[in-house]
Image (cartoon, grey):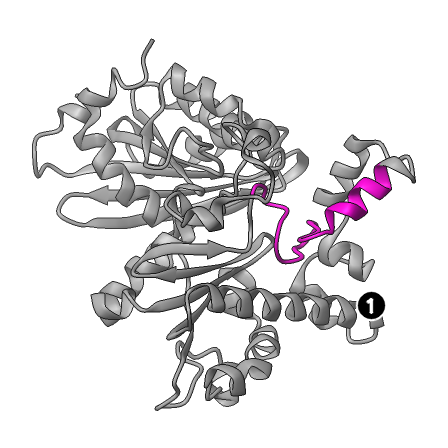
Amino acid sequence: MNAHDKPHGQPYSVLTLNSGSSSLKIALFRIDDHVVKTMSGAVTGIGTSEARLTARTTYGETLWDTRACCINHPVALDTFLKKLATHVDLSGVSAVGHRVVHGGPYYTDAQRLTPRVESDLRKLIRLAPLHMPANLDGIVAARLRLPNALHYACFDTGFHADMPIAAQRTGLPPGMEGEFIRRYGFHGLSYAFVVDDLAERAGKTAASQRLLVAHLGAGASMAAIRGGQSVDTSMGFSALAGLPMATRSGDVDPGLLLYMILEKNWDPSVLQDQLYHGAGLLGLSGLSGDVATLLRRTDAPRAGEALAQFAYQARKQAGALIAAMGGVDRIIFTGGIGEHAPSIRAAICEPLSDLFGIDFDSDANDRSAACITKPGSAVIVEAVHTDEALTIARQGRAVLANAPAQLNQRAT
């Protein structure tokens, strides 16, 4: 039975796939009246002789934690799914949802993956060279292993598609911007989860407040969200913009880049590689792009300087984004750093306390409580766990419901 032939109300399974440059994150969901995660796992270190494969049930039971040679994404996915097949009947997987970083000007909502859609996405590789090749490799690998499932894509740029025109413009003349050039914004699947999660636990009124959401991880960005809609975000045309990240530069004066090319004779491809892979916390510290590692290196002055620079730039972005929506009611930290680095949260929030009425609770922050402000604080500050896979599974319900109509969408 094809996915789009499922009778109304009959449960079905969806596999979600988040394909990174050297990793895969995989989750399995049962979908009926609710969307329930039953398993999650990952393959890390793809391209090495000892990639790590892990999986556990929603209840915390470890299914496996092992090493294997995974030279590329197809091998990694095939190895993972072979192990998963000993626990789950993969022929019962109706759909596979893929995280795709960039939808460009074409796609904002989840889309069934057709040859036309994939062709459009390949045109966007130059817009997100760090992410799109891995995303597309994951799609190819999953289709080879699960050819009878419906495959669909969800886009990180989609959440920001309706930002005000002033936030979308780059500063270039319209004639230069053309079809592709605009500020897109990223991490949209995470932001969508945060808004939905807030509505579920605090009500729709809370989710409609003025929110500053900080998705801080190896890739880091912030977004101003009002009424559940993106107002502006720190990333822009590319996923390089905004905050310094693990290995990405964040904002750099465009005049400086021109100077490096024209006066210092840097080859653009070498400069691109440096901006994506050799800058950010790694470049600033000279040690690592991993915040946990830098926090442990109290003996290394450049480690502390790199973390201070990260927090400083985050405070600047926070102030600008709060101004864009005319104030803030709630600040939400998420991502690996946002959720697990209390000292970084404190370094961002405490200097802003007087300006925005944040009654920061250092004790709650140190123990990583869900709410890290005191009762009566004018602005509530929280740390939450994001779940992009759940957003992908939820968005897939609409794709499956409309699958027959989507078969002909964009077909030529």
- Looking at the image, residue 177 lies above or below residue 163: above
* Residue 359 placement (x, y as % from top left): 46, 89
Visible residue check, residue 121: yes
Q: Quadrant of the N terminus?
A: top left
- The answer to whether 296 appears left or right of 235 in the picture is right
Residue under pointer 1: 302
- The answer to whether 261 appears left or right of 227 in the picture is right
Magenta stretch holds residue 75: no
* Residue 315 placement (x, y as % from top left): 60, 71
Q: Residue furthest top?
A: 412
Measuring 56% from the left and 33% from the top, which residue is drawn there? 177
Q: Quadrant of residue 142?
A: top left
Residue nearer the viewer, 30 or 325: 325
- The answer to whether 296 appears left or right of 225 in the picture is right
Visible residue check, residue 186: no
Bounds of the magenta segment: 237-261
Q: Quadrant of residue 11?
A: top left
Element at label 1: helix
Measuring 72% from the left and 58% from the top, which residue is drawn there? 281
- Looking at the image, residue 190 lies above or below residue 174: below
Q: Quadrant of the C terminus?
A: top left
Measuring 59% from the left and 42% from the top, which residue is drawn there? 238
